Image (spheres, grey):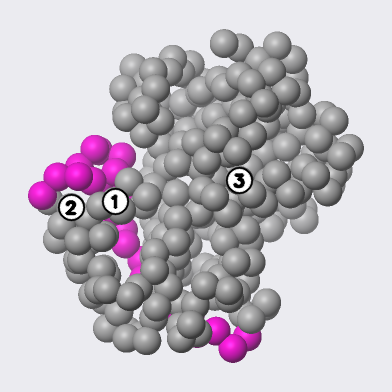
Amino acid sequence: MQPTAAGAIGVFDSGYGGLTILSSIKALMPEYDYLYLGDNARAPYGSRSFESVYRFTLQAVEWFFSRGCHLVVLACNTASAKALRTIQQRDLPVIDPERRVLGVIRPTTERIAALTTTGHVGVLGTEGTIQSRSYEIEINKLHPQLKVTGEACPMWVPLVENREHDKPGADYFVRQHLEQLLTGDPQIDTIILGCTHYPLLLDKIGQYLPAGIRILTQGNYVSESLKDYLRRHPEMDAKCTKGGTVCYYTTDAPDKFNRLASLFLHEEIAAQQIKLERL
Ligand code: DGL
């Protein structure tokens, strides 16, 4: 079903990973309209330069705005780490100061202190997210006493994007990065899955995770934070239409997107293809 009016909430990811976030948002707030865009033609973003991730993300945000969205969630840690701050501080005031773009890092970091007992936190993410040190910076702004160790897992997103995440080949890469993280800091008791693709690897992660270590996925934190944001900003809530619809868009072939997205969402979808620029 198509949204009947402008005012859907935009949800963006480089590919399929943001569907894990959309799924939690829809479960908590089914009454809103949503537009999902996966930039599958240019995924993965994780090993791309700051400049490319920023440029691609800004193009996506402008596309959402052109479709009538007032609020866009970057359901992608890499885009949140590398592009969100510049878009919020430099671009939005020029494009339209009334529109908002939110990310996925802050909602997760706000909850972390209550969850760790040792005060040692691990973050698994893409190269871009880990190199940016965004989690460490955001967590230490709120809780300077926490020790944050990051581990980049460059193969994990390709495993998910290629539907290999539940196959035997994934075991090697999952074990390797968990071991490296926990060797780096053996006192870690809480690990943030700082990439929206990684929940698809939860079964494999569970097989290699030592007992007593908690794994955090972001869906619930992001959806609860979005709900809270709309409660605190009734003027934005009033601009978000509530028809209960979701439309899916991809920058790559829709038939492949439909096939794989259905597996992530456990429902059939029919995405449309769009072009963000001359690729
Ligand atoms: N799902 C994204 C994230 O949360 C991006 C992964 C990628 O494209 O490399 O970081």
Tell me whether the residue at label 2 lies in contact with that at label 3, contact meaning CB atoms closer than 8 angstroms: no
- Residue 82 location, quadrant: bottom right
In-front residue for pair 23/35: 23
Give the left or right position of residue 39, taking residue 12 as reference: left
Q: Which residue is mark 2?
A: 170
Three-letter amino acid code at the position of disc 3: Ser
Please say if 179 is above or below 166.
below
Which numbered mark, 2 or 3, is in the foreground of this view? 3
Expressed as whole percent of the image width and height from the top left, the position of residue 174 reads 23, 61
- Residue 11 location, quadrant: top right
Q: Let me know if residue 226 appears in the view.
A: yes
User: Is 159 one of the magenta-colored residues?
Assistant: yes
Residue numbers of the magenta segment: 144-168
Q: Residues within 10 Å of mark 2 (few under 14, many from 20)?
A: some
User: Is 152 one of the magenta-colored residues?
Assistant: yes
Three-letter amino acid code at the position of disc 2: Ala
Give the left or right position of residue 75, taking residue 228 as reference: left
Q: Which residue is mark 3?
A: 223
Disc 1 is placed on an element classified as helix
Expressed as whole percent of the image width and height from the top left, the position of residue 259 reads 31, 22
Three-letter amino acid code at the position of disc 1: Leu
